[in-house]
């Protein structure tokens, strides 16, 4: 039941106004002074106040200002009750925080309609505030979940550098959001073999973090048994497919797997829809795409993947990247991007510090000191550079 506080310095007016609501389902309170209005508003929290312009102790305008300036009562509706509704009276009423104004020479139906309208507005306002509060709570929960997902992902994926056998490598990762969709790993398969994988799952955010955590565990387990890249991707694909087969979700991941055989100086690689890696031949001063084809993992059970072999020479470079590097500026011009990145790698191939090479790549495609860095928000960027 809505509660209405009727405030007037005339007992007669209070009686007449109260009588207007006799047959309506309202709880009626009354007040004869400004101080009573303020006190009863704080004590009883009425939904609406029908407020006189003048009281013996203070003006109705001052009463309204005090009510609206109090955080505990600011949402109480105020309908001013004046002798004559002039432009000046309406302006002063609105400036003091009133929600509406009506003349004392009123029609009962007009008054009850005004009151009903204001109470509907109050109800809508309450619903909006409740929805806003709910959304804030959901946002806090989401922020917490995102922070947790970010912590999990950072434990799995991070910038790194290292060496195995005769190969040095560095990795850089730039997520588009707090939690990105790229995943990668560089790890020894034996004393003479190094495994490298680089992938990109569908989506971003928390779902991507869960997929990456799952794929990282799969990768570690499967790599213990399947060291050939094509067999490795086939096993990853089937396990991934079976998990989401009946989910109704379109979940997939692009993934590249490459093995460096340090003893035979061979590269073995297979590709599941990922960006082709680049081989930089330092002596011949040229760049070659390591081409291998196959469907992204998770799209079709028992997918097969091309198995390719490429000989390498010590001192040459391997460059891996995800499509976040190329798509911002060259999404519709892949050949132009390949030319640009090849020219850049040849220009900086002699850098001894591998991090400097990746820094230069970033600085060319993204001015990290300008607004271009915001373009990283469109997609994740992962870069791996190996010196063989």
Image (cartoon, helix red, strand yellow):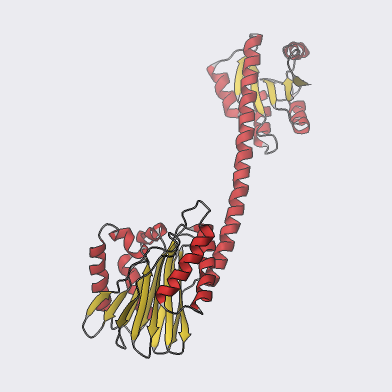
59 and 192: which is toward the camera: 192
Left or right of residue 237, residue 101 in this image? right
Residue 9: x, y in percent? 74, 17
Q: Position of residue 360 (x, y in %)?
A: 32, 73
Give the side of residue 181 with respect to residue 141, left or right. left
Up/down of 98 relative to 335, above or below = above
Is 96 in front, or is 385?
385
Q: Residue at x 51, y 57 (%)?
A: 245
**Vertical comparison of 31 with 302: above or below:** above
Of residues 142 and 297, which is closer to you in this image?
297
Closest to the observer, 250 or 301: 301
- The answer, for residue 98, to whether it is visible in the render is no
Figure quadrant of the N terminus: top right
Residue 276 at what x, y percent from top left? 32, 70
Q: Residue at 34% across / 71% down in the picture?
A: 306
Is residue 387 at least partly visible in the picture? yes
- Name the residue at 35% across, 89% down: 264
Q: Is residue 205 left or right of residue 349?
A: right
Q: How many marks?
A: 0
Q: Residue at x 63, y 28 (%)?
A: 122
Residue 296 falls in which quadrant of the image?
bottom left
74 horizontally vs 203: left or right:
right
Q: Is residue 95 above or below residue 217?
A: above
Quadrant containing the C terminus in the rendered view: bottom left
Whole-percent x, y for residue 342 in the image = 25, 73
């Amino acid at each position: 039941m809505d509660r209405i506080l009727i405030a007037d310095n005339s007992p007669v007016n209070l009686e007449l106004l109260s009588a207007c609501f006799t047959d309506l389902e309202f709880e009626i309170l009354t007040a004869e002074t400004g101080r009573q209005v303020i006190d009863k508003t704080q004590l009883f929290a009425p939904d609406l106040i029908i407020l006189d312009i003048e009281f013996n102790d203070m003006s109705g305008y001052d009463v309204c200002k005090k009510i609206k300036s109090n955080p505990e009562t600011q949402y109480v509706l105020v309908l001013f009750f004046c002798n004559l509704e002039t432009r000046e009276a309406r302006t002063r009423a609105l400036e003091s925080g009133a929600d509406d104004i009506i003349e004392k020479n009123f029609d009962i139906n007009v008054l009850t309609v005004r009151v009903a309208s204001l109470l509907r507005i109050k109800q809508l306002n309450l619903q909006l505030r409740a929805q806003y509060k709910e959304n804030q709570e959901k946002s806090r929960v989401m922020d917490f979940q995102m922070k947790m997902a970010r912590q999990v992902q950072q434990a799995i994926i991070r910038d790194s550098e290292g060496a195995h056998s005769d190969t040095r490598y560095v990795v850089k990762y730039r997520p588009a959001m707090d939690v990105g969709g790229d995943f990668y790993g560089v790890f020894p398969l034996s004393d003479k073999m190094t495994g490298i994988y680089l992938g990109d799952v569908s989506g971003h955010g928390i779902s991507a973090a869960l997929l990456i955590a799952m794929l990282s565990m799969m990768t570690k387990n499967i790599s213990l048994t399947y060291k050939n890249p094509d067999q490795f991707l086939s096993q990853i694909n089937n396990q991934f497919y079976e998990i989401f087969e009946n989910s109704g979700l379109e979940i997939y991941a692009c993934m590249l797997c490459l093995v460096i055989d340090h003893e035979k100086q061979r590269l073995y690689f297979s590709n599941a829809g990922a960006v082709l890696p680049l081989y930089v031949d330092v002596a011949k001063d040229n760049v070659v795409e390591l081409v291998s084809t196959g469907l992204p993992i998770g799209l079709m059970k028992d997918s097969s993947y091309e198995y390719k072999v490429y000989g390498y020479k010590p001192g040459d470079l391997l460059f891996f990247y995800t499509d976040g590097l190329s798509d911002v500026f060259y999404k519709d011009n892949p050949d132009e991007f390949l030319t640009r990145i090849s020219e850049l790698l040849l220009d900086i191939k002699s850098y001894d510090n591998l991090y400097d090479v990746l820094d230069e790549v970033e600085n060319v495609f993204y001015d990290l000191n300008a607004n271009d860095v915001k373009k990283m928000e469109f997609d994740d960027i992962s870069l791996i550079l190996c010196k063989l």
